[in-house]
Amino acid sequence: MELRKPAVVPRTLKREKAALIDFDEHLIIQGYHSKELSEDIFDSWLRTLAGKNKAVKNKFSSIRTFVKYLNNMGNPSFMPDVPKSKSDFIPYIFSDEELSLIMHYADNLPIQANKACSPFLELKIPMILRILHGCGTRIGETMALQRKDIDFKNGTIYLRETKNSKERRIPMHSTLLQILEKYCFAISIMMTPEAHLFPGRKPGHPYSSRWVAYWFTELLRLANVDQREKRLRERGASLHCLRHTFVLKSMQQLEAAGHPVNMNDLLLPTYLGHETLLDTDKYMRFSGAQIPESLEAFESFTAGLIPKVEVPYEDE
């Protein structure tokens, strides 16, 4: 990994290290000792991988870099293809009743006071969820916020650490702004511009996204939201589904206000920090039977933008 440090950003280095550790553990389990990696060993590893298609592809991309290194070092190894995948993911859309229950339990979080708990945890979790739900932000860019990123005068949030470096300034609803102002006073950061909006237990570091996900899972359990058994690779309600729910509700509000979304109006994709219309299209993968009026609205939005491809019938 030392050889990779000068060539990649820390996030990529961390991802590649995790992939190598995962692959190494598989080799140990299989009793594989050769320095020349075979196609069979990659096939057996692929069958063990679970989770998002993107995560699986990232792992294989990382291992391909390692295979190039092995080949250059004189250990001829099979170069695996990155698995082709077609996402059939349909996000969990929270109902108003479910969101109310989740926020109720967030506001009454069952936290036992101890040294291991992050300071102001009972305030941070409800505030984080309100921003995710009310602004449709990603969890990573939300946790990176600092006090200086909140403009209380103009009612905006400035997102700096974003996906694809798409920095943007987004508006907040006045009610969310009022709650956020009280929050900043409550944790004593209103007059400290450089302070993290959601400070972690370690000074100078933000609260961990993984801990937010942990508490959100606990809130789902308390609210009895999506507690069904899930199959391998199947996903259910998660923090990121709040962003999908935000997109759906934004579409509904625009339509209800007589403001149909069309090609000349890219407010929503710009707000979300998407690079293309196809990125926003991915956020509209919900059940048409559940919300047909919103599906029709989005079909109108993307009319003529996404070509239909006729696939010929193929005998097996």
Image (tube, grey):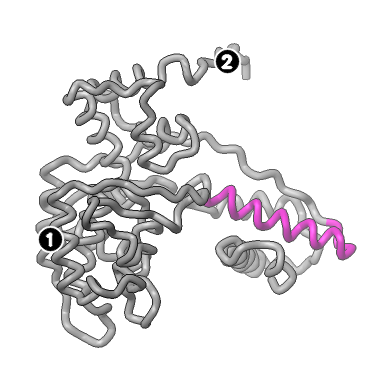
**Is 141 situated above or below 88?**
below
Assess whether residue 57 is covered by the magenta stretch: yes
Lateral position of residue 138 relative to residue 217, left or right: right
Q: Quadrant of the image for the N terminus?
A: bottom right
Amino acid at pointer 1: Tyr
Give the mark, 1 or 2, whose residue is nearer the N terminus: 1
> Which residue occupies the extreme bottom position in the image?
115
Q: Where is residue 159 in the image (x, y as percent from the top left)?
A: 38, 54
**308 vs 202, nearest the viewer:** 202
The spot of residue 263 in percent (x, y) is: 40, 21
Q: Does the magenta stretch include residue 78?
A: no
* Magenta stretch: dominant secondary structure: helix
Quadrant hosting residue 2: bottom right
Q: Is mark 2 on a helix, strand or loop?
A: loop
Q: What separation in Å lies between label 1 and label 2 (alpha carbons)?
A: 49 Å
Looking at the rendering, the stretch of residues picked out in magenta corresponds to: 55-76
Q: Which residue is rendered at x = 28% and y = 83% of the image?
A: 116
- State the residue in front, 68 or 21: 68
Provide the residue designation for mark 2.
311
Amino acid on which disc 2 is placed: Val
Which residue is denoted by mark 1 in the rendering?
A: 105
- Answer above or below: position of 127 versus 133: below
Instruction: Answer left or right for 146 relative to 305.
Output: left
Helix, strand, or loop for circle 1?
helix
